[in-house]
Image: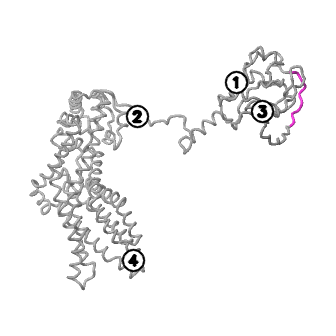
Amino acid sequence: MSSTIPTARAINVPPPSAETLTGPQTQATPMTPAVVETPSKPSSSEHILPEGLSSRRSSRDATKTDGGSEAPVRSRPSTPPRQSAPKVLSRASSASSGGAGRAADPHGSGENIPMTPLTPNLNGSSSSLASDALRTSGGAPSITEQRRSAATETGHSSALPRETHDEITQLTRGMPGSFDPLPRAEADPGPRAPGGLASLSAATVPSPRDVNPRIDIGSLAQKLPEDVTGCVAYLLSAMRQGPEDIPALERLATQQAAVLESRGIHNRDDFVSVLKQVQWRDQGTAMMHGMASASGFNLGTIPANLKLADLTLTSLMKAMPSLPVAVPALITGALMGFALSMLDVASGAATGKTFKDAYYTRPPGEQLPEPLASANAPTKTSLAADNSKAAGLSYGAVRNGLVRIPAMLNYELKGQPEKRAAMDGILDPALGLPLGGGGMRVIKNDFDVSAGRAGFQHLLARDDLGACLDHLQKPAAEQILSAAARAGAHVKNLKSTFPEALGDVFASKVGWTSHAILSAGFGGLTAMVASLPTTLMQNYGLSEKDANVTTQMLKYVVLQALYHVWGGALGAVGGPKAPDPAAVSHA
């Protein structure tokens, strides 16, 4: 905090005399607490001196002159004096104005004003009357004392010791409203990988997830060496299974580094830029892949949600009037489940052909060297677990949990079940494509990256790496046209793969597994939704609104279990022989 008085100009201080430095030799007297009288409120015409000049000592002892005589106390004038600041006094004029350390009264009253610089006190005010009253007699403090006081206030703005002040600052840093003058310490990314081919023969190699961050690859960039060959070698080292793989990986790293440099990629920054482009493009491809795979199932729910299911249930209830409503509802749900399963399985053949070579980091096996083409192949158990978790997260947690359930509660709690049914008929297919199908494929691809079956290292191992880099460097318009052409190719593939689709629907284990699970699941679910509200109202005394809410919540619990069972069963039946068992599902 600065001690400069903004309303007064600087005053040159004369050299201190011996008497000023030593002070008058008077007998010490015990200090008594100063009695401060409450001043009366000044009149409206009374002038208040600028801050600093108005805070002179109230004790008569503090205004003694060098000769021991007392300076007269100036009374406030009846009229306001000039509002201008005091003139700057020269060293000579200040010395002749009545003693060392004094300046003449700028208003001409003859008063000698002590030139005591104001030092801010701890509470932020510019002076303290209490400290002035308790100061011993002897005039203004010496120059040494003034400098020591100013240095103390400049170096420390707190009465706490430096160690305690630093500790409190560390504890409060990051709290809401706190001031953080120091930059936050960044996490140490660890040692940087060595340049050249040294990473391939290192004692430890990174895991597939280490070289494939999920969102931001900044942590990976900080580990990479500066040269392109070292970057390629570090990523390819995640493929090393044993010492026998080192010679082949060294040849591959040298070859692919030359391909990168021929496309203008000469350092780490260029290399990381390519990885960023590849990452977001493959994530977009995964969304399109999943939506295409789920198109049959989700588009089939549109007529079922609108009128088809209701018309079927009404017809069966008329044909079986003596049976409980749960029976025709069970049949209706089973029929709907079987039809949706057929559409889902049939869309898998065309989707697999369309997106076979659409990824940068998931190349077909024939575009990888032989040892890498079959590396880290999935098992029945791992594939079942991945499919089960992916289906439950995408269709259950994301689509139903975040969108459909809140919408259902909004309408049901308002007593509007008809509006709830209409809204659910729209949300089900509309969000089933991006959140359900697309989300499931994104999650499955992430599982494959963690297992080492896809990722940046697979991009660098491709035998067509040069063509991939050329495509990345094309103008944006050409790349958009390329994506549109792939969408058109998918429509053609639906026609060309129709015989294969029929075989998948009626002559494959995966197809019949899907039919059985979805038929039984949707049949039981429809029967529960049709009969449970009446049972809850008649047997348990629930109101219509409470019965509907309870039924709908149980419906989503059953659906969550159905997603997990369905996805896991398809993965287990598909087995490791199928390179993409999700081609006949929503994966």
For the N terminus, the quadrant is top right
**Where is residue 119 drawn, in percent x and y?**
72, 30
Q: Quadrant of residue 260?
A: top left
- Residue underneath mark 3: 80
Q: Which mark lies nearer to you, 2 or 1?
A: 1
Q: Along the horizontal axis of the image, is 544 left or right of 294?
A: right
Q: CA distance from mark 3 to mark 4?
A: 84 Å
Nearer the observer: mark 3 or 4; the answer is 3
**Magenta stretch contains residue 463:** no
Say above or below: 297 vs 543: above
- What crowding class fits label 2: few (fewer than 14 Cα within 10 Å), some (14-19), or many (20 or more)? few
Q: Secondary structure at mark 2?
A: loop
Q: Earlier in the sequence, mark 2 or mark 4?
A: 2
Q: Residue 29 colored magenta?
A: yes
Which badge, 3 or 1, is on the more N-terminal residue?
1
Q: Earlier in the sequence, mark 2 or mark 1?
A: 1
